Image (cartoon, rainbow, N blue to C red):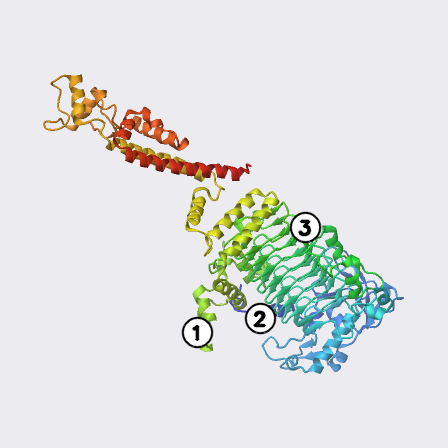
Amino acid sequence: MADDEEKLSPEERFWKRWWEQDFSWAGLAALDEDRYPKRPWIGWEVVGDRVRVAQVDYRGRTVPIAGGEPATLQDYWRTRFELIEDSIAEDAISHPLIDADQLIADGLLVDIGSGGEKDLWHVAHLPFTDKNGARTPKADWKEADWATLERVVEQRLRATRPSDFNFLGRPSSPDQRAQLTGVVLRALSLPDRFERAPEDADPAELAKKSDVATRSVLRCTFNFAWLRQTQLQSAVILSPVSSVSVFFAGDADFERAAFAGNAWFQRAAFAGDADFQRAAFAGNAWFQRAAFAGNAWFQRAAFAGNAWFQRAAFAGDAWFQRAAFAGTARFQRAAFLSLADFSSVIDIVPEDARRAATIDEPDPEPSVQTLIKDEKFGVANGIGALASPALFNGAQFWSKADFSNRRFLARTDFGADEEAAISSAKFYDRILFHDAAPHGDTNLSDDNVAAVVGETLPWPTPCDNEWLADLLNRTRDEDEVVAADALPWPSLRQTMDYFSAENDEDREQAAQRLPEGVDLQALRWVWRAWKTKSEDKPEPAEFERDYRRLKLLMENAQARNEEQDFFALELRARRLRRSGVSRLEKISSYLFEWLSDFGRDLFRPMVALAAITILFAAAYGVVGAVTPPLTGEDAQARLDREAGPDAPRLWGPNAVDDVTRVRLYAMYPALYQERFDAFEPMRVDSTDPHPSPWRPNFDAWREALAISAGRTVLPFTDSGQRFPWWARATRLRPGLTGLIGGLHRVFAIILIFLLVLTLRRRFQIS
């Protein structure tokens, strides 16, 4: 990727790509090496001074039938569209062409060349500046100039007729849509004379008035267009609409629009609000890598086909309230930096959802009001279900995600997709599923919760956040995508310095410290969302209620593992409450987590039981070791009885050394049968010239371990009395042995209780 490409803002990068497409007058008529138009007007051929319909082959290419040449986009913009009577056969439709001199005379073709070189542009494609940045006449247009262009566009919108398309959305018959690819318009809207029928109009009466019934119908394609304002409320778009890489510089209004075919909005950039409220998509809707800088409104929208929002970025609020998805809804690796509202209020079955966005093309064509009032087009009120799989793998929810009252009628996946190398969705704020009905195959667990009570997330980087890398690459082609570690992105300190600058001079100095080529628009989006998260003080009680509701929903759905996950989150949120929770309850909650992971981990309590068994075995051994088995007189008396009156002295004056004492203990077991020897007595027949009395006595330690294991498994029994050394220790040190034994029993009872509770929760034993 060239260095200068990295320095461009998203709008500047759009214009760079726009210039590469070459929408000049000559560029509209350019041919490839096969002499076929690079920008064809599919299904039309030029014969003399007229353009007429032709045939379309299986590849979607024009096949002339009257000996003409395939028409280009230039031919489209020099066509004078005439009124076509319904009685005229489809294959006989033709229109006259206007030559370039007449277009220049009419002010529709403008020369912006310099130095004697011609550079002709149609006013529809004329940019505000040329390649060198010099202002073009369009930059200084008056209202009358814009009105002239809008009349030209209106004529083409009126001239549209039905076309046929294959499953890929390519024309299979002459393309009679408005060819608005590459246009630079102040506004794209239904002209004022496209009168809309009153809300209470009778559909039967409207059908009799063909001039009214057809005025709200729109068929167009506008790839690579720059649109300051887009107002297509209640438009019925009866052909596939293609708006790939469009830059909507202002608000885009598609409220109640009806898309009869597929709708492509890939990599579209919405600088203002995007309004698709109650829009109906009868085909597939593609919004991959679309960037919504403002709010995105999709309330009550109906998607009869698949809805593709993969890698889309929502900087403002994303409203999908009551939106109905009959096909698969794909939001994989989408980034919701503000509110994401998918809530609903009623139920709907898949057949109803598909019927809600089904559009036929009756003759004459219906008005918007007719379609909306029609029973089979029931998008006017209250539909809202996920009737087919909904995929949110890798999606990021920085603010509240609301799925309340939503009916999940098919698999909903928030987990990781290992085959596609996509991680699980992450929620950094509240997850609302109040009164929702999740499908039994809903994949949602605590792995999706990145912040238990909405804690401030760390400053994201492209290397650690695939969604951020997608956001920074949103305007690039697949072959231009930059690796995450090569994307310019500032640190948190650099970002704070830039956005907290108090004057232009400080802002300029902070900008110089930013990495070269950083995407300032994306940085502004992320900073605004991150700053909001940092300043908000979440209330743990709200999260506790949310997790409790999710726990109950998963329990009702028989999703046992997920139910345990949200039970754990509920307890974690509860102990973070500022009031209403005692210190003892908080301590118990921490112990419950540490010792059993809230009843989800069988291994932890078993390890804890083994640990206290070993620990208290050592404690018992130490008590036995410090407890003298016999007094000096008793031991000496026993040795005298065993060895005779001349026996050596064990204690006191003239006592033997340690080695001799160990040998005597080995020769006369009666001397130590009530003694806990932590170290093994030396054998009498040892050939070691320097015998050591400090070898571990494994037999003695096994006895201590047996006592500890017995008390761990059966806390209320005492099997240690069968060992003489422990019986003597309990007689001589009753307080110490009683304290250690009591602590052992308490810990054992707690851990056994946790183990039983974990077994019950883990295997759902009633």
Task: Single out the mark in the foreground, 2 or 1.
Answer: 1
Q: Residue furthest right?
A: 87
In the picture of the structure, the residue carrying the numbered disc 1 is 509
Residue 423, visible in the rendered structure? no
Q: Is residue 29 left or right of residue 363?
A: left
Label 1 sits on what residue type?
A: Gln
Q: Amino acid at mark 2?
A: Glu
Disc 3 is placed on an element classified as loop
Which residue: 26% across, 33% down? Answer: 733
- Which of the two discs, 2 and 3, labels the residue nearer the N terminus? 2
Specify the label residue 12 is tagged with. 2
Q: Is residue 274 left or right of residue 212?
A: left
Quadrant for the C terminus, please: top right
| Circle 2: element type | helix
Amino acid type of the residue tagged 3 in the rendering: Ser
Q: Quadrant of residue 154?
A: bottom right
Can you give x and y, in whole percent of width and height, for residue 469 in the image? 53, 59
Q: CA distance from mark 2 to mark 3?
A: 39 Å
Residue 150 spot, x, y in % from top left = 73, 76
Q: Residues within 10 Å of mark 2 (few under 14, many from 20)?
A: few
Nearest to N terminus: mark 2 or mark 1: 2
Tell me where residue 168 appears, x and y as whole percent.
72, 56
In the picture, measured across the screen, residue 732 lies left or right of residue 241, that is: left
The residue where tag 3 is placed is 388
Q: CA distance from mark 2 to mark 1?
A: 23 Å
Asked if one can make out residue 68 in the rendered structure from this viewpoint, the answer is yes
Q: CA distance from mark 1 to mark 3?
A: 52 Å
Q: Which of labels 2 and 3 is toward the front?
A: 3
